[in-house]
Amino acid sequence: MEMQVETRLSDQIARYLDLATSEAKLTAANMANVDTPGYRALGMDFEAEMREAMDGVDRGKPARPVRLKAVDGLIARPDGNNVSMDREGLNLAEAQLKFKAGVALLRQEYQRVMDAIHVDGK
Amino acid sequence: MNLFAMMETSGSAMQAERMRAEVVAANMANAETTRTATGGPYHRQHVIFAANAGDAEFATSLSSVAGSAGIGLSASGTLSAPGGSGSAVAPGVHIAGVVEDPAPPLKRYDPGHPDAGEDRYVAYPDINPLTEMVDLMGATRAYGLNSSAVQAEKGMIASALEIAKS
């Protein structure tokens, strides 16, 4: 019988963690440029990327770079910068929670594999 | 995806904001300085922030955002691939330069001052404490914002270490 330590679910969670990291990285980049004149906040469509990543896992395709897009609906300051501190703070908290949820799920998944290894109680 | 790259991004911002606060402090300290190495009164300094290009993909998307005056960003803008090449460079911020405010000095009548001119007026730096304080507050807030981002990133890295624990 084939031994499967890396399950489909763990692959999916790994992609999810990658996306959560991308989101946090984007937020960090926006926060870093909160005072840079002319900087426009960058964002990503998490749901669309997630859908594509899940499809990629099923088809066995390698992970693809995240598509960045300018964030709509932000008010630009006179210096052309449109980074909103509140939005970025919330986004960072969200990305952090997503990441922690992914870590918890991944731990559980690996724990299942460990349980199967130790099923004879030794 | 490099988790530490995020800390570098936030770190670059903290460094830049600290520099900005230092320049503000220098401005306030020299609010009454009438003698400098270059001669004449002190001139107000400001910092110029510029976005780091980061890795190649980030640079492309950044320039496409900066290039278009409006919002339109091309759909080809990408963030570095997980484990991809060049993902170690952080798309942070750096100080492009510290420039001198060209505003003319303030003339104040002070005949007893050793630096008074022929007309008995002394040239003082044109420094408004209000402007400097507001700038300092902005730097402090942005520094705090980025330091809480570092805190969050540390939490993420710490929780990633939990995966291996059983």
Image (cartoon, grey):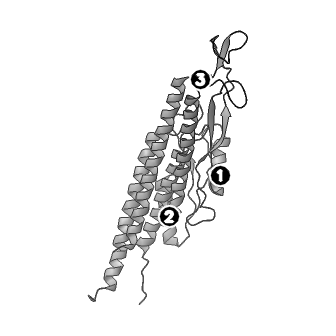
Residue for badge 1 = B59
- Type of amino acid under label 1: Ala
**At 54% from the left edge and 28% from the top edge, which residue is drawn?**
B132
Whole-number angstrom distance, CA of label 3 to CA of label 1: 43 Å
Q: Is residue B163 above or below residue B46?
A: below
Q: Is residue B61 above or below residue A72?
A: below
Q: Find numbered disc 1 in the image and state the secondary structure of the residue it sits on.
A: helix
Q: Check the residue under mark 2 and report the chain it is in.
A: A
**At 42% from the left edge and 76% from the top edge, which residue is drawn?**
A7
Is disc 1 in contact with disc 2, using a CB cutoff of under 8 Å?
no
Report the disc number at residue A64: none
Q: Find numbered disc 3 in the image and state the secondary structure of the residue it sits on.
A: loop
Closer to the eye: label 2 or 3: 3
Q: Check the residue under mark 1 and report the chain it is in.
A: B
Report the disc number at residue B32: 3
Q: Is residue B128 above or below residue A47?
A: above
Residue B155 sits in quarter = bottom left
Picture coordinates of residue B141, whole percent (x, y): 46, 38
Picture coordinates of residue B78, whole percent (x, y): 60, 55
Dot 1 and dot 2 within a common chain: no
Q: Is residue A81 visible?
A: no
